[in-house]
Structure formats: C-alpha cells, structure tokens
Amino acid sequence: MLTPLEMNTQGRFMGQCLSNSSLTGLRIIIGQTASGKSAIASRIARHSDYEIISVDSMKIYRGMDIGTSKPNAEQRKKIRYHLIDIIEPYEEYNVAKFVSDCDRAIADIIKRGKKPLLVCGTPLYLKALLYGIFADSGSDSQLRAEMEKTASEKGLAFLYEQLMKVDPAKADKIHANDRKRIIRALEVYKITGKPISTLQTHFKKTELRYPVTMVGLKWKSEELYQRINERVERMFKHGLVEEVKGLINSGKGLGKQSGDAIGYKEIVRHLNGEITLEAAKEEVKKGTRYLARKQMTWFRRFPDIKWIECKLGDDTDRIYKVMTESLE
RNA sequence: GGGUAGGUAGCUCAGCGGUAGAGCAGUGGACUGAAAAUCCACGUGUCGCCGGUUCAAUCCCGGCCCUGCCCA
C-alpha cells in the first residue's frame, strides 16, 4: 500500500488508505483565533486516545510560544502534539511541506493505534491537506528576488504582462496588483515550463484525500473580539515583549515568515522605537481581529462543517459534550 | 441660577442655504509552495428635539433637552 506521502506525490485520492478504525474520517476542529478550539481539543484528547495535530502556520516555530498560544508544558506532558515546534523561526516553510508533514503525522498516529485530532487555524493548510497540491515545483528564492527587482525597476505591470503572455488563464484570475501571485506564477512557469494554471487543479476535485468530520466553534464577532482583546492583554502580561526580545537577542532572530506573525511584528516595531508599547498592543488586537475575519471567509466555503454556537459565559461542559458527540 | 462651547456615521471630528464627508473602527470577497502573507471591494446617517424664516434648512432665527468648561 502506498503511504499518504507517495500518493500525494502522484496526486491521487487516498481516502481509502486509512485503516478501518477511522472510517468516519479525520476529526477536525476548526475555529477562528481565540475561539477556544485548542482548549477543547486538549480536553478531548486527555479523555481518549487522540493525539493532536496542529494545522497552524505559526505554531511550527520554536520559541514563539506566548504569541501563538501554544499548549503549555503541563498540557504537553499529558497529550502528544504534532507539528508544533518543528522548525526555527529563521527557517522557511510552506504549504506543500505542511501537507507531507501532516500526512506523515497522521499515518504515524494511526500506525500506533491512536486517533489524530486536527486543530485548524490556517485554513489554506487544511484545504491543501484535504484536496492535495501539485508536486512538480519547489520555490526559488533567487528567481523571486530577481523578479522583485524587475518589479521595482520596471513596475509590476511589466511582470503582469509577461504572465498574460505565458499563462493568460492565471493572469485573468488574479489582480494586476497581486505581486506575490504574479511572481509565483512566473516562477513556476520558469522552473517547469508549464503554466501554473494547468498545475493548480486539485482544489476543484470533488473527492477529498481523507474522509472528514469537521466541527467548528462559532462566535458572534463582538464576543469573539472581547475574547481576543482579553487574550492579547494576557499575552503582554505573560511576557510577550520579553519573548520577542529573547528571539532577537538569540542572534538568529525572526525570519521572513515568522517575522510577519501577529504579536511579533508589532513588538519588533516597538523595540525599534517606531511605536509605543500601548500602540503595539492595539495593533496586535487589531491584527488579530483581522485574522479572525479572514479565517471566517475560508471556513464559510468549507463544506459540511457542524457549527457549535458559543457565547460568553457559556457552560464549557455543554460545548465539550456537543463536540465529543459530533466527533463520534 | 448666569455665562460659554458644543450636540453630524460605532468613535474622533470637518462641512455647507440646494437633504453630507474624512480618519479610525467595522464589513464582504479572492486565495493551492511567503497564507498570521498577498490582493480587491464596501460609507443613509432621525446632521439632538419642536417650531419659525425661505422656493429650499443639517446650515439662519426662537424655544426646549442634553454634555463639557467657567462664574455664583
């Protein structure tokens, strides 16, 4: 039998590859930032044979603990977590790596007779896991740098025109100002000789790579924002600024991707003397609200999510009960 | 009680005799190898209330209510 990773390379559907014990599918908890999904997932895992897989583009970085709300040492003693602390902040990561890392983690958990429980805060990663992603091209940072240079010298429109020539279908789909997507599309064309639009076909499939059961925590935005504000206050109280200072002073510093993390980029600006601490805190709150909104635009498009309505002051036992029943 | 400044979008405020605008906040969407990234789009609100002047009032006049400040 092929491993999930091998099947992914071949771009084939592999849902049936899972053992019989998980026929109802991969259990996935989704929710906006600060929705409480991690806490409830931990509680579920503590009382059963689940292991948690983090589907999160920022929890992968070692040393970025407070700002990404990772599980604490106590929790990690009781529950096994995957795809947390897998690389250094100065290292690079991407969706495709996530898909293969996650496939491997799932297979490993199942092989040991346990059940994976995915907790998703980065919807793109989940989508790529479920639908697959083309495997013909990596990325080329030198090529990107050259194109960035061209863009600043001759204007982005110059690159967009190139894209219109080599891949009109893709050019049509993206906006002429969307620098990153224009550069990526040209990068793929230059590496593979194929238009990226002919490779990016997986998301249109109707069959998923895994059968799934998805449950989501849903909040009214005002109440979620209140939780966000409280959580950001807590992060600062618990030493987020010191954490960022520590990362910078370690010598290696933050990377291009990890340095974009909400809660980190704002504090870096504060430490550089650009903004006050109070302003940084407000920016972190604002950025987190923005993140929550963007997560929701993805979730709205995911099919078959069972939503659990949450309210401030809710009985957490009730949510736990509904959640465990939904995941059966 | 007297004086004074004001009451316009969720907030801070600008504005003008021809029924209104900015910043911030907020909202919707796109998204496949940087995604906590990148990009696109979205501004009707009793202009405090009642009356008057006027062809026409958010704007001018009068009264009232409310808020800040000053004086008693």
Image (cartoon, coloured by chain):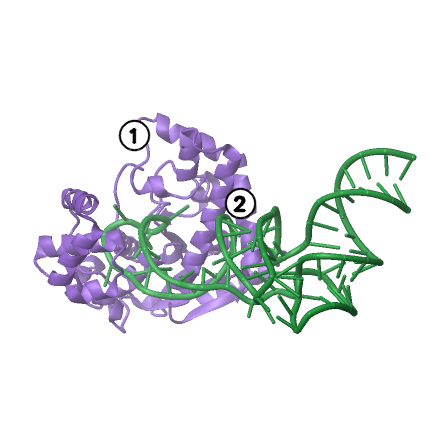
Q: Is B21 on the left or on the right of A191, as rendered?
A: right
How busy is the neighbourhood of tag 1: few (under 14 within 10 Å), some, or many (20 plus)? few
Question: Which label was assigned to residue A151?
Answer: none
Q: Chain B takes which shade in the image?
A: green
Mark nearer the N terminus (2 vs 1): 2
Q: Is A289 on the left or on the right of A131, as rendered?
A: right
Q: Nearer the viewer, residue A154 or B39?
A: A154
Name the residue tied to disc 2: A231
Question: Which label was assigned to residue A252?
Answer: 1
Quarter of image, res B28: bottom left
Can residue A13 be spotted in the picture?
yes
Which chain does the residue under circle 1 lie in?
Answer: A
Distance, label 2 to label 1, CA atoms, is: 28 Å
Q: Is A239 on the left or on the right of A171, as rendered?
A: right
The percent position of residue A295, horizontal first and vertical second, equals: 41, 58
The percent position of residue A132, horizontal first and vertical second, equals: 24, 62
* In the depicted structure, whether residue A219 falls above or below residue B35: below
